Amino acid sequence: MHIGLIGGIGVAATLVYYQRLTAAVAAMGEPLELTIVHADVSELIRNNLADDRAAQAHSYARLLGRLADAGCDCAAITSLGGHFCFDETRALSPLPLVSAVAPLDAFFAAEGLSRVGLLGTRVVMRTRLYGQLTRTEAVALDAETETLGQRYQDMAVMGRCSEADRQLFFDAGRRMVVEQGAEAIVLAGTDLGLAFDGTRDPGYRVIDALDVHVDLLARLATGRDVL
């Protein structure tokens, strides 16, 4: 299956998707058909903050048209924050959309997790992953959503993580574990890999939502799963 990705939101996340998806498919011993189009992260941020779902969906639709013209069989948005208009985009899309949110509920249940903590955009944390987790409870630091969301947004746009930001996110995760009983912290923002890059142990379990999405895309790309 030819996979299409809407990238650029942000660039660092797109690079990680590309690296991990190519590695996953190679490990399966199969070739990968992949096309990536570049979205405008500033436009996404503006529409996300204004909750202008229609505008962002129409922007995605133009990019999805390009992916369809390139011969893609399905497409995915490489940003959990960018899923805020998923339903509106799906209604306009010429291609089937592979959600990054939907597989998470099943993954958490399979891992036996009853409560997870969320780090990501303001909307992702405030809505608890758009209210789509039904089998696992999600928690967040509600009083700090604005601060954490802004720091995440700044990091995503810059494409790099400062030591101060790394410590901010590490500490936020620790407090969700200690104070709110989270059994794992979910990187529900695709650029959070810049902070949680594996070079340091934060002292608690971390689940990268990007990995769950990539696993599904790899199985679709190799015919091990179907839409």
Image: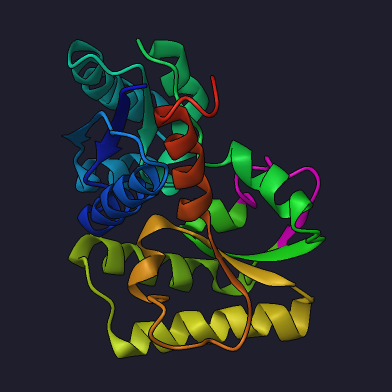
Residue 84 in view in this figure: no
Q: Percent x, y for residue 216?
A: 51, 38
Would you identify the image quadrant in which residue 56 lies?
A: top left
The answer to whether residue 54 is seen in the rendering is yes
The residue that appears at 37% across and 14% down in the rendered structure is 95
218 or 5: nearer the viewer = 218
Magenta stretch containing residue 134, yes or no?
A: yes
User: Which quadrant of the figure contains the C terminus?
Assistant: top right
Nearer-the-camera pick, 168 or 186? 186
Q: Residue furthest front?
A: 29
Q: Quadrant of residue 158?
A: bottom left
Residue 72 magenta: no
| Residue name at image x 43 percent, y 88 percent | 200
Which residue is depicted at the point 32% across and 50% down?
A: 17
Q: Is residue 216 above or below residue 14?
A: above
* Region in magenta: 127-138
> Residue at (29%, 26%) from the top-left corner?
60
- Give the image location of residue 221, x and y in percent: 40, 29
On the rendered image, what quadrant is the N terminus found in? Answer: top left
For residue 92, side relative to residue 207 (left or right): left
Q: Is residue 80 above or below residue 218?
A: below
Q: Is residue 200 above or below residue 213?
A: below
Q: Percent from the top left, x then y, of residue 92?
A: 39, 12
